[in-house]
Image (cartoon, grey):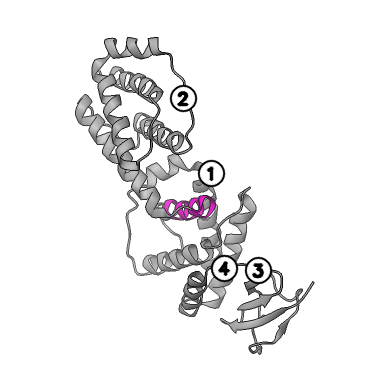
Amino acid sequence: MASFILKKRLNNNVIIAVHEAYGEVVLLGKGLGFGKNQNDWIKVDSYEKMFVLKNGVEQEQYMKLLPTIDEDFVEVMNDLIYLISENIHSPIHEHIHIALTDHIAFAIKRVKQGIHIENPFLTETKDMYPAEYGLAAKVVKLLHDAVGVKLPDGEIGFIALHIHSAISNKSSDEFHHYVDLISELIQLIEVSLKVKLDREEIQYLRLARHLTNIIKRAQNRDKVDAASELANLLKNEYPLCYNLSCKVMLEIKNALHIPVHDAEIVYFTMHLQRLISKNE
């Protein structure tokens, strides 16, 4: 296998190199860049980890980020990202090296300064992405062991979103859009049914999960079957819940510009009727 040619030394432990098969890559290893100059050869057995940042903008972002953080912390972060990749049974987007490193470095700085940032989506994140949340909790624990800083639970939620973004290759902004939509829909339901749901209670979590699954099925164009007889029965027996279910599906369709299967109305009507029964 051909060696690497050093293109730019970011610090003693991180360099950007060129390989004839991989193109431009980021190589990491203790003292890897020490005493090295541009166009020097780097042996294939001299680095510990490698990742590819094919996007030129991301390479530039990473080069600007590294000088602002401690070299030992870079090594810790790459160990944590390696842990994430080992626990996820699918490829992760290399942008996580930039986004997560930047986020955690800033989170540690906030904690040291006594600044607390509330995570308004913690409950939804834990419910919607339990695997990512569990992995994020491990990351926070290992980070505490490595650098001696304990991040609050809200940061577990933020880190879980970074992990999910790296898996799905979707931005956290897209997730926030979905959460805002779900929050608005639940407010519509609360007003229409004259109920108030505790965000920590199982009824709220079940409702949020049902709405999330409706959105996912609509995005994936998954077909949902329901008997027309059942739809007519629910329409006649529970007109308030049926009409509200129709309104919710229309809101999802308009907000995300995707079709929602009519059968979703049936199952969500049943969910709303159970919700009313439990709150009477």
> How far from the left and from the top, in percent, is residue 147?
52, 67
Counting residues from the start of the chain, the first of labels 2 and 1 encountered is 1
Cα separation, mark 3 vs mark 2, equals: 44 Å
Residue type highlighted by circle 1: Ala
Q: Quadrant of residue 252?
A: top left
**Image-based side of 181 in relation to 49, left or right:** left
Front one among 14 and 221: 221
Counting residues from the start of the chain, the first of labels 3 and 2 encountered is 3
Mark 2–mark 4 contact, CB under 8 Å?
no
Q: Residues within 10 Å of mark 3 (few under 14, many from 20)?
A: some
Label 3 secondary element? strand
Which of the two discs, 1 and 4, sits closer to the camera? 4
* Mark carried by residue 131: 1
Can residue 234 be seen at all in this image of the molecule? yes
Quarter that holds the N terminus: bottom right
Cα separation, mark 1 vs mark 4, equals: 26 Å
Residue type highlighted by circle 2: Val
